Amino acid sequence: MKNVQADRALFLGGFPDAALPSKIACGLHPRIEYLEFLHTNPARAMSFQEAQESQSLIVRSVGRLAGPYWSLAMLGRLRRGLSHALVTGEDLGFPMALIQMLTGGSMPISIITHGSFLASRKGTWVLQALRGASQVQFLCLSESLRQQLIQQHHLPEDRVFTVGYGVDTRFFQPDPLTSVKSRQIAAAGMANRDYQTLTAAVDGLNVEAKIAADSSWFRADLDIAGKQLPPNVEARSYGDYVGLRRLYAESACVVVPLYEAVHACGYAVIAEAMAMGKPVITTRIKG
């Protein structure tokens, strides 16, 4: 890793797993975008732990009153000499940008944009407020999100970019040693999944549908939770990324059924399956 340049920071939502680097080194976990970014860009990673452990009375007070996202955003604002911030999502990037706008700051902020707030009044209001904040850029996970921000929320085109989603093609790649089960269909993920339609579609067919009902990023109740599934459908956790990769490898194709949404979802499974050379069927949605 290059020497850290103290005046640049990568702000992470959530609590990063300290064991990730060792898991990746042992081949038990795919490489993660933010770690790869830190390997090639001189920056400091700042997470919830730093916000919570900060000795600043102001930061601790904000954290108690408004939650950890706001306290981390305030921590970024209070750091002296910080010249640029890359933020991993709107839940953290929006409050950081608002704090800076209200306090007259000019630090460039780049927000990785998932689209989770586009359908809410609060998100619409924040985007309107940030329309004139020339130092704020939006890095969208899909081109459709970019078009929404430009066409519906009227953000300047030169501040909105499509960056896509990175997949570790060393971890996820075609596996010639695994026998493919010609009648096995794989599905995976939890965010916005329309598994009801998938199970109804395969009910009675001479296929086996295996659903990896788990996610490292998004926890939610599935639409098939507690329901009687057809005998040729199985939904369970596959434990870890190694188990998920094995499921992809032995399946003839991967299906990603989605409910309509304006935010990006399903992209991780789609990219992972494509990296393994699998045909992918997914729902065309706005996000």
Image: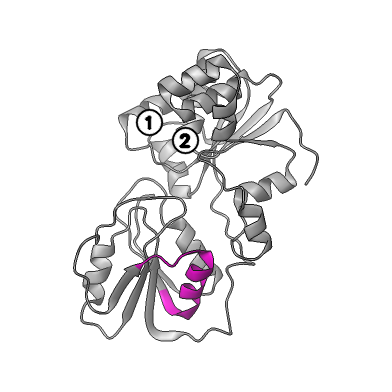
Question: What percent of the width, then of the height, locates residue 272?
Answer: 52, 65
Instruction: Report the side of 16 relative to 38 (left or right).
Output: left
> Does residue 135 appear in this view?
no
The residue beneath circle 2 is 90
The residue beneath circle 1 is 123
Chain part drawn in magenta = 236-253
Q: Secondary structure at mark 2?
A: helix
Q: Is residue 272 above or below residue 248?
A: above
Name which residue lies at 48% across and 30% down: 69
Q: Quadrant of residue 177?
A: bottom right
Magenta span contains residue 228: no
Question: What percent of the width, then of the height, locates residue 88?
Answer: 54, 40
Q: Gap in Å between the C-alphas at discs 2 and 1?
A: 9 Å
Q: Nearer the viewer, residue 133 or 42?
A: 42
Q: Quadrant of residue 44?
A: top right
Name which residue lies at 68% across and 24% down: 82
Are circles 2 and 1 on residues that touch, CB within 8 Å?
A: yes
Q: Nearer the viewer, residue 168 or 18?
A: 18
Name which residue lies at 35% across and 59% down: 284
